[in-house]
Image: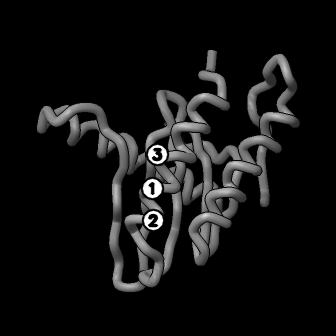
Amino acid sequence: MESVAIAPTATGAHSLEEAVSRELSTLRMSVPGLLSVLVATSDGLPLVGDCRGTDRQTAAAMAAAALGLGGEIAGRIRQGDYCETVTRSSDGYFVTYRIGEIGVLAVVAPTGVSLAMLHHEARTTAARLARLIPPAD
């Protein structure tokens, strides 16, 4: 997986990047067939992951836009905090999951993937990532 630097922590940026990459690998193993998985900041910078069909910068920006719009919609309809967005196209899905206050997990999946299984596994991954990645200063 491609990656960019993550802010240093007490254990070091390199080990955090590896830990995030392991989480994404676990997600891929749990939900076979995923085309892309990416962790991005809430302002659209790619952190760790890969993308097919578009470049990482664009995918991270789209994920951040979905996060922002989803958060705005959730606030306006007064149904609690934003959690995720599903964009369904004729050939698959672009799904974003909020990672605490720090960012977004974006997944591209083909139509044959079980959306229920994807939600179950990706929600768990996003929760683990929220505990793993420190908030920006």
| Residue 87 image position (x, y, % from top left) | 34, 65
Which of the colour schemes (rainbow, by chain, secondary structure, one colour) is used? Answer: one colour
Q: CA distance from mark 1 to mark 3?
A: 21 Å
Amino acid at pointer 3 = Ala
| Residue 100 image position (x, y, % from top left) | 48, 31
Decide: marks 2, 1 in contact (CB < 8 A)? yes
Decide: marks 3, 2 in contact (CB < 8 A)? no
Image quadrant assignment for residue 44? top right
Residue at the image point whose x is 45% and y is 65% from the top: 117
Query: Left or right: 68 with respect to 15?
Result: left
Secondary structure, mark 3, is: helix
Secondary structure, mark 2, is: helix
Image quadrant assignment for residue 102? top right
| Mark drawn on residue 64 | 3
| Residue 131 image position (x, y, % from top left) | 60, 28
Q: Is residue 53 visible?
A: no
Q: Which residue is mark 2?
A: 117
Mark nearer the N terminus (3 vs 2): 3
| Residue 50 image position (x, y, % from top left) | 69, 62
| Mark drawn on residue 120 | 1
Q: CA distance from mark 3 to mark 2?
A: 23 Å
Amino acid at pointer 2 = Met
Question: Dividing the image into 4 quarters, which one contains the C terminus?
Answer: top right
**Neighbours of disc 1 within 10 Å: few (<14), some (14-19), many (20+):** few
**Which one is in front in this view, the residue at disc 1 or the one at disc 3?**
1
Rendered view: 110 above or below 3: below
Residue at the image point whose x is 42% and y is 84% from the top: 91
Decide: marks 1, 3 in contact (CB < 8 A)? no
Query: Left or right: 73 with respect to 98?
Result: left
Residue at the image point whose x is 67% and y is 66% from the top: 29
Q: Is residue 97 visible?
A: yes
